[in-house]
Image (cartoon, helix red, strand yellow):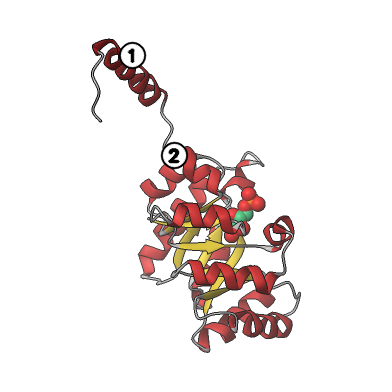
Amino acid sequence: MKFFVDTADTDAIRELAALNMVDGVTTNPSLIMKSGRDIKEVTAEICEMVDGPVSAETVAADADGMIAEGRELAKIADNIAIKVPLTWEGLRACKVLTDEGRMVNVTLCFSANQALLAAKAGATFISPFVGRLDDLNIDGMELIGDIRTIYDNYNFDTQILAASIRTANHMKEAALIGADVATAPPAVIKAMVSHALTDKGVEAFLKDWASTGQKIL
Ligand code: E4P
């Protein structure tokens, strides 16, 4: 499973990229707002740091507006994936932009039917939002499984990008179900390393080591 980082925080991306943990980046208008930076400037910086796809989101409500914004965002770098919402207008924009050979990430997906439409419209990535469904007591991970089954039934090339990932357990479940990609905040990726028995084991080994009085260096 590829790891995308869901942030516009360049320091956090740099830290994870140094460990080969970044196969791509996703941003959205809220993350750009949080960064406090100009969208084109920060996106260009991210695209230089990361070889893989960097999603930048359109904000127009109609297809023509999304297409124009998408083409403008795509000028930032070759690895831009244009994000459009899963509306009828977004699907129209997706078709035009993918026909032009651009990567398109269709976002805000909350149902298997929406994902089926996005694949038919040629989406490069579909972003089902796991955490926001969980917030409503609906099993978000079940949606990832349903989309996996449907895409496999018909050999769709659209990559399943599990989004709105909130916990390390979400990462494990997405990998088990067969999501192509999961995009998660840096803190969630770092939380994957934590295990109480690892901490306890390190503590016990260091205590025993100290009692030997030996040194390695
Ligand atoms: C994905 O592309 C979105 O930016 C993101 O995963 C949304 O996550 P949230 O529901 O935690 O805001």
Tag nearer the camera, 2 or 1: 1
- Nearer to the camera, 199 or 56: 199
Q: Position of residue 25 (x, y in %)?
A: 52, 62
Does any portion of residue 117 appear in the rendered image? Answer: no
Q: Which mark is residue 207?
A: 1
Residue at far bottom of view: 100
131 is higher (above) or lower (below) than 48 = above
Residue 192 numbered mark, or none:
2
Q: Is residue 19 left or right of residue 125?
A: left
For the N terminus, the quadrant is bottom left
Tell me if mark 1 has few (under 14), some (14-19) or many (20+) residues whose alpha carbon lies within 10 angstroms of its own: few
Residue 40 badge: none
Q: Residue at x 59, y 46 (%)?
A: 131
Task: Tell me if residue 59 comes above or below residue 108 in the rendering.
Answer: below
Secondary structure beneath dot 1 equals helix
- Horizontal arrangement in the rendering, residue 65 relative to residue 78 (left or right): right
Determine the residue positioned at 41% across, 37% down: 193
Q: Quadrant of ligand 1?
A: bottom right
